[in-house]
Image (tube, helix red, strand yellow):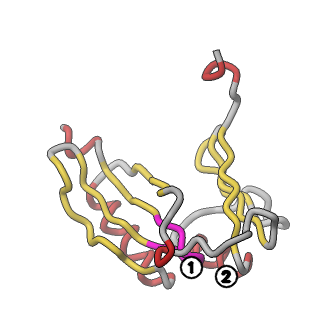
């Protein structure tokens, strides 16, 4: 029932410094929906990432050193794009935890940490499977 009723998915990502986080994601090539607000990245019409500064959500330090409560995954169309986005992460100040490599017969992936310590995967499944 609910999978038919939910109209979208919004990830509310608490950040320490919205300006630095905006610049980080801008360097990765993401565009913000509202040029004046600059806090919501629209991946598609129904998937959005909201950068939220100083909210009740930031009650504790969620860095990699203390464990991660989730991993955000970006599925891209090709291995080349995994590699390119990995380089952009490095240039924007992110930390690469696992260099791009084929993890299994169906997954080529990289793992990185953003400026606030959130863990991300950049992965390609379509090209590996074909």
Looking at the picture, does residue 130 appear above or below residue 78? Answer: above
Measured from the top left, where is residue 105 in percent x and y?
Answer: 15, 45
Find out whether residue 41 is within the magenta segment.
no
Looking at the picture, does residue 126 appear above or below residue 66? Answer: above
Query: Which labelled disc corresponds to residue 63?
Result: none
Name the image quarter holding residue 88: bottom left
Q: Which residue of the protein is positioned furthest toward the left in this rendering?
A: 105
Select label 2 or label 1 by which is in front. 1
Looking at the picture, does residue 130 appear above or below residue 33? Answer: above
Measured from the top left, where is residue 9 in percent x and y?
Answer: 65, 40
Is residue 110 toward the left or the right of residue 29 in the image? left
Mark 1 — residue?
115
Q: Which residues are magenta?
A: 113-119
Report helix, strand or loop for mark 1.
loop
Is residue 1 toward the left or the right of residue 87 in the image? right
Measured from the top left, where is residue 130 in percent x and y?
Answer: 18, 37
x 20%, y 63%: residue: 101
Mark 2 — residue?
20
Q: Are dots 2 and 1 in contact, CB under 8 Å? A: yes
- Magenta stretch prevailing secondary structure: loop
How far apart marks 2 and 1 lie (CA) works out to: 8 Å
Q: Which residue of the protein is positioned furthest toward the right in this rendering?
A: 36
Q: Which residue of the protein is positioned furthest toward the top in this rendering?
A: 1
Measured from the top left, where is residue 30 in percent x and y?
Answer: 58, 63
Is residue 61 toward the left or the right of residue 93 in the image? right
x 45%, y 53%: residue: 73
């Amino acid at each position: 029932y609910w999978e038919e009723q939910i109209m979208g998915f919004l990830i509310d990502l608490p950040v320490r410094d919205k300006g630095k986080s905006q610049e980080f994601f801008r360097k990765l090539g993401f565009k913000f929906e509202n040029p004046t607000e600059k806090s919501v990245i629209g991946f598609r019409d129904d998937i959005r990432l909201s950068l939220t500064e100083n909210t009740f959500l930031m009650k504790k330090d969620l860095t990699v050193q203390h464990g991660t409560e989730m991993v955000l995954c970006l599925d891209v169309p090709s291995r080349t794009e995994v590699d390119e986005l990995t380089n952009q992460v490095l240039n924007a100040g992110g930390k690469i935890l696992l260099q791009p490599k084929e993890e299994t017969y169906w997954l080529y992936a990289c793992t990185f940490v953003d400026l606030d310590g959130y863990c991300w995967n950049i992965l390609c499944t379509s090209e590996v499977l074909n």
